[in-house]
Image (tube, rainbow, N blue to C red):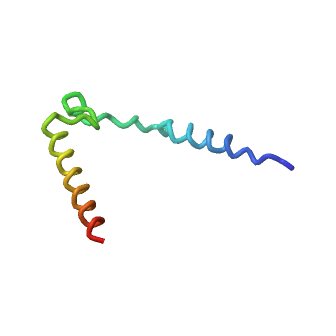
Amino acid sequence: MEKFGIFNLLSALSSLAAKPAEGEEPPAPPPDAETAPAAGVFTAEERKTRAAAMLERHEQISRRIRRR
């Protein structure tokens, strides 16, 4: 039985997608990329509010389960 070479095909497609077409310039990064905080990095206050919201949702779900 002959192998289909799906990995070779995927590799070729990904290399084509990574290269810009002829005459096209690669996309420029956003102008505020240097000043913006990295994605996924939160301040202490943001972490505190997210944790409080998550704990509140957990408590609401736990109360609904206990009632049953």
Q: Position of residue 23 (x, y in %)?
A: 45, 37
Residue for point 32% across, 34% down: 28
Q: What is the tally of numbered marks visible in this picture?
A: 0
Snapshot quadrant of residue 42: top left
Residue situated in front as seen by the camera: 40 or 35: 40
Residue situated in front as seen by the camera: 19 or 6: 6
Left or right: residue 26 compared with residue 4 = left
Q: Position of residue 4 (x, y in %)?
A: 76, 48
Residue for point 13% across, 38% down: 45
Q: Quadrant of the C terminus?
A: bottom left
Q: Position of residue 34 (x, y in %)?
A: 23, 28
Q: Position of residue 62 (x, y in %)?
A: 27, 60
Q: Residue furthest top?
A: 34
Q: Residue furthest left?
A: 45
Residue situated in front as seen by the camera: 6 or 56: 56
Left or right: residue 44 compared with residue 28 = left
Q: Residue furthest bottom?
A: 68
Snapshot quadrant of residue 33: top left
Residue for point 25% across, 34% down: 41
Residue for point 26% across, 69% down: 67
Left or right: residue 45 compared with residue 23 = left
Residue situated in front as seen by the camera: 42 or 25: 42
